[in-house]
Image: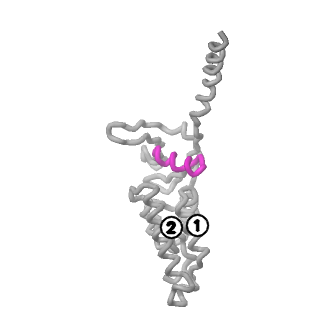
Amino acid sequence: MDHSTNHPPTHYEILSVPPSLFSTGLSPSEIKQTLKKFYRRALLSHHPDKSSSSASRSAITIDQITLAFATLSTPSLRQSYDLLLASSGNDGSSQLGKHKLQTGIETIDLDDLTHQEGDSENDSEDVWYKPCRCGNSKGYLVRESDLEEAAESGIEEVVVGCADCSLWLRVVFGVVVQQEEEEETRPEEDGKEIGAQQS
């Protein structure tokens, strides 16, 4: 593929990763392991000392490969990168599977979405949804696992596209730390113990 005439190679193209890898239902650790395989393969095929063709040596650098791996293996960076690709009109946006051209984005709080509790018997997770103006009653769907993945990455927002149109929704949320509640109750308990010992 000649990247110089069409567009610069996307991170997906640099690592030869199909964007559908992220929607296959693999766990985050399985995705990261698979990405490492693509990363190592790309390093070997584009390494100046290992590669036999001069075309592949000049096309993609080790720095590009490293940046591509760092971006795609970090969920928050990958999400931002996918939005950038989709909004840039880059030919790579057609490879993003479910991601479509971003024509609008609205920011909303998680509390403003309708919450549907998961069923523990069926192992289904909690979801939050909001109808889209295109008519889909659950156009924007946020899963509990999406929120957990974002929180683990240190971000407190997720960006979701409508299932039926090209509109996007940025959902912001706060992470509640339960440890604070436990610390608030401990001083009272400690005070009772001290008072009991003095009696």
| Residue 156 against residue 182 in the figure, above or below | below
Residue 142 in the image: x percent, y percent?
48, 46
Q: Label 2: which residue?
A: 93
Q: Is residue 99 above or below residue 158?
A: below
Q: How many marks?
A: 2
Give the overall secondary structure of the magenta segment. helix
Which of the two residues, 45 or 175, is positioned nearer the viewer here?
Answer: 45
Name above or below for residue 99 compared with residue 56.
above
The picture quadrant where one finds residue 109 is: top right
Q: Earlier in the sequence, mark 2 or mark 1?
A: 1
Circles 2 and 1: CB atoms closer than 8 Å? yes
Range drawn in magenta = 143-157
Q: Is residue 81 magenta?
A: no
The single residue placed furthest to the top in the displayed view is 199
Q: Any mark on residue 88, and which?
A: 1
User: Is residue 155 among what the camera can see?
Assistant: yes
Residue placed farthest to the left in the image? 122
Residue 103 image offset from top left, x and y in percent: 55, 58
Which amino acid type corresponds to the residue marked 2 in the rendered image?
Ser
Which residue occupies 57% across, 33% down?
A: 178
What kind of element bears circle 2?
helix
Please tell me which residue lies in front, 99 or 143. 143
Residue sitting at x 53%, y 56%:
75
| Mark 1 Cα shell of 10 Å, populated few (<14), some (14-19), many (≥20) | few
Amino acid bearing label 1: Ser
* 6 and 157: which is toward the camera: 157
- The residue carrying pointer 2 sits among few (fewer than 14), some (14 to 19) or many (20 or more) residues within 10 Å by Cα, namely many
Q: Is residue 147 magenta?
A: yes
Give the residue at x 57% y 62%. Answer: 81
